[in-house]
Amino acid sequence: FFFRTRPKQITSKIFFVDDHINHTMKSYVYRTASMAIIICSAMIFSLATTGAAAAEGALSKTDFENQMQYRFLHPAGSISEEAQCNVEELEEANDAQLHAILQQLAKTSFFRTFFVDLDHGCPLISFGSSKMNEKDHHGSTAEAEEEEETEDEFECSGGKDELDEDAEPLCTVDTGGAPGGTFGAPDFFSSAALSNIQQQSSWESESQERTFSWKDPSDPIVVNGDLMTTVQSCGDDELPDTFWLDMCSQIKEGNAKVVNLALNPERNTQYNGTHIWNAIYEENCVNFDGDDSEMCFEERVLYRLLSGLHTSTTLSIAKNYYPPSKRKGRDTWEPNPQYFMEKFSGNPEYIRNLHFSYVVLLRALRRASPFLYDYPINSGNILDDEAASMLIKRLLDSHILQSCSSVFSAFDETLMFESSTAETGYTLQENFKGVFHNVSSILDCVQCQQCKLHGKMTMLGYGAALKILLTPEELISTSLTRNEIVAFINTIAKMSESMKEVRELAHLYFLESEKFVSELPVPDPKEINTFYGDDPYRHVDRAVAAISELARTERISADRENELIALAFAKDPALLILAKHYYTDLSKFLEHSKNIKPGLADVSDEEPDAIVVGSGLAGLAASLKILDRGGRVTIIEKEHRVGGNSAKASSGINACCPNESKYDDSLESFKNDTVKSAGSSANLPLIETLVGRSAEAVGFLKERAGVDLSLLAQLGGHSHKRTHRPSNGMAGAEIIYAMQKAVKKFEKDGKVKIMVDTKATKLVQENGSVVGLEYTKEKADGSPESGVLRAPNVILATGGFAADRTDNSFLAKHRPELLSMAATAGNFSTGDGISMATELGAGTVDLEKVQIHPTGWVDPKDPTNPSKVLAAELMRGVGGILVNGSGQRFCNELGTRAYVADMMLKHNSIYVETGVWDKGSNVPTFSLILASSAAEDGKKHVDLYSHKGLLMKLEGIDALASWMNVDVSTIQSTLIQYRNDASNGVDKWGKTSYRGVPIENLTNETFYAGTVTPVLHYCMGGITIDTEGNVLDEKLNVIPGLHAAGEVTGGVHGDNRLGGNSLLECTVYGTLVGEKIPVRTRNKSSVVSAAKNSHSSKAAESSNLREISMEEVSTHNTPEDCWVVIHGEVYDLTLFAEEHPPGAESIYELAGKDGTEAFHAVHNKGLLDDFQEDKIGILIR
């Protein structure tokens, strides 16, 4: 454990209770270590976590509090002596407002563009030499001395699961202490790092020599109270106001590269940077007054900032540990909760230092708010810059600063350098800045470019924060560069995200541990006598006695006592086994009992893991994901058949870019189109999730459900072809058919139960968590039936509310002027899910934003019917033309739905004047016309609509004019002008894409035409969710056990939804929810057997490896046949080469050779564990 003790009677500080102890304190520590461990362990394990809000897709506050074994990872109470606020306040502020804003801000064009010099060389020829490791914070100097020299060309920009056989991996947090002595360094340089640099006898170049400015030190150092260099007088007791302006001078831009931070997230590269961290921690030595027994205030501040950086880096690595790999079946970067636990389970102070760093940064943010509020943001992307400016203002708005005042004012920078005398204060400030400069320069010795990028960005962010805090306010506006501001905001966002990652990774570890325990073979409670070989009630008695004693001595709460007693009386096998072996050792009984959770033993095997309300695409996607993972699902559908409105969808589903950026599309372009359509209500995290997972969503439908999505179209509002649809049918119908077929396959073994004609009426909530719902249904005899279904998770996928026209409907409350408009939604779209969720306090967003689709078919047989069939977006995408009653075009048909509908409604004079539809006015109608080539392109749709009598086939211009009841010359003139616009490439409304243009001889053209009108189509507003589909309450806290996906949710589409994004939303958020729902393991024996078989097969495979000579290896030396020897074993890396994060070339260079040396220069040997299936033989010499 790392901790500090400060009783006045103890004149020491403990860094590590193992072999990593300050040598001057080792003898004392050995005498006190046992007592300290007992005391601190007890304190750590008793920490409460009342302030922890839910990590996205992880735990609610209540759940996290109940998981006792993780409390040491989530310290509560005061953050530190230097920050006067507690963990609870900080996390509540982060979860409630700050995190969402910061993550959106960091992804805007301006703040993701960073200038950095990644080529500035390290001044030391052999940075990892024995000199540098005289004092290794990892406590293993011998191993570090044996490390080979690493050259600059061995850079890594991605990573694998790599763990060195003998050394700690990169980003380990075992080096948390800051040495208090000089470790034998010369007096002038009072740290090992500076000492080694001073002793460096040769430099690779003059520029490298100039890199470390302290070789001829500009920052004076005090040793034993004497100033070693002459200090230029700056007044009697004050430094100049400009003293802190060069804080960032050692983070050089030089030949700067422009880096897109969004494309270079921090993740596991397996670069072994132990020597870098050692040097950084050794450099944290500010107070050289001869007393090395305790850090001064300023030294603690700097140490905690560096430790916070280290902690954040480690969390990013743990969160993004395993890279995508076709061989491993990984589509995305995956976390390593075990790695996280190894690094933090015994070191809660590291988490506190992360909190402290966040507090310091927020304090700086508040101090700089007058300058940042109106800071000119200009990246060249006008739309994105406006969004960034809005987010900055939102972050700095007074109500946020006021509501989070305890957090923004928790750190007081005026206490720094306050207690020193004039001379020592000045020297202390010089030392403080000098150490910061030295640490900044050490980053040039990092050989992994992505590691260097994130290290420099964070240190620049720290430097900007310290500059803001320590510089007079009037100088702030002129002292910060663009790059410093970018780094500052990104560093705050990084710390904010790290706080979320702590809970998420702890939760993932808990799930994995729970699954492991559940897979262990345990005795059937009915056979418990056989298992124990004696009377089981004796162990029940022992368990109750132990529980009673723990309660009597107040070592467990009354609630925990009740839980354990209930488990004992239920003869819970785990608890009785514990009682059998530990009933005489209450401390161990208490410790191990923390892993026993109530409710696991008495949950019926038939109880579903989730109840899904609604059987549209969102509900089916969530259900299929859960079922594929071995879970059980109950689907509630109030209609007689499944599918909902999803079955009606006709345009297709958007995605970018499954076909390797075909048609020059890109995620950025897709995002921009979606943001543009969403307008001022754009929620960037939700949109980025929608866009970023679009290719995966389409892949899921094609590969898992077998849906044909082979055709590609461009819909209105899109700048590229990205709407995927079937070649043999309507998108919604085809998708729903395939999905329900896949789900229903699980019915025969009871994994899924589909209850049609059943309406959910109320959610059931216990202790703050949703645990089921009440329902009603009509029996066969017509009589009503009601009941309750229970499950630990309820997923709402009930759709929108556009068809509900009652007086108390959401439509009547929020958009009463639209009640007279027809709608495309089914009559079942009445907002049931929103009503049930809001009864529990769920938040809502954008309920007033109801989409008016421009083209609903008017059935000539029933023109006044309030329910309309949608004229798919595709009809305009393939070349459909909109013409008004006068025979004139009036808009760009490929504009957004909101734009086209607005241009339609402007045919009403009252709407033109007010901008609000007059519910007493008749909704105008228009003609949608397709030429023969357009009709052929959209043949499936044209055939369907023609069959329904909604489209008429008309031969020639005369027939078209007659059908429209306009003069032939008028419509002919309109179509000729359209052909001319197509030839010119643009019309007066800005249309630039032309498909299905009528032929020149209009008399011989075949037209298809129908009447359309604006209709209510989609509700953008709904329940508030986060990016993983967790339902949030009005204060943006997660409601445990309640999830939502699809049209029932709000915020994904903003002001207006793009065509093709509804099916995408259902698939993306439905699968996201389905992936995160905890699934109980029910078939233990098969899992254990599978694991045994897998282990046996691997062992057998390993024993069958053949011997291969180097001569044979040398013949496999091409990209198509690439064998490489590493540590005496032969690997076929042909398939892996293209997956290699830094590129295939470095693998091909080693083809047919022994690559051990090159491998060892960059990677740890543990990486090879991930390549067992690629190992083909043993090298013989």
Image (spheres, helix red, strand yellow):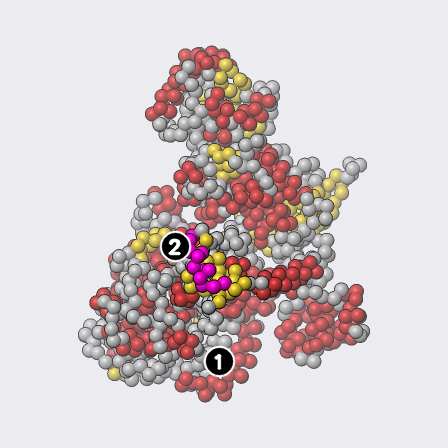
Position above or below: 104 against 929: below
Residue numbers of the magenta segment: 1108-1119
Instruction: Give the numbered dot on residue 1051.
Output: none
- In the image shown, does 1121 or 458 lie closer to the viewer? 1121
Label 1, residues with CA under 10 Å away: few <14, some 14-19, many ≥20: few
Please give left or right for residue 631 compared with residue 6 in the image: right
- Name the amino acid, label 2: Glu
- Name the amino acid, label 1: Asp
Q: Name the residue at 26% across, 80% down.
A: 188
- Residue 588, quarter of the rendered image: bottom right
- Residue 23, quarter of the rendered image: bottom left
Q: Position of residue 411 (x, y in %)?
A: 39, 67
Q: Name the residue at 51% across, 83% down.
A: 33
Separation (CA) of disc 1 from disc 2: 44 Å
Decide whether residue 1111 is among the magenta residues.
yes
Instruction: Give the numbered dot on residue 1145.
Output: 2
Q: How many marks?
A: 2
Decide whether residue 1008 is among the magenta residues.
no
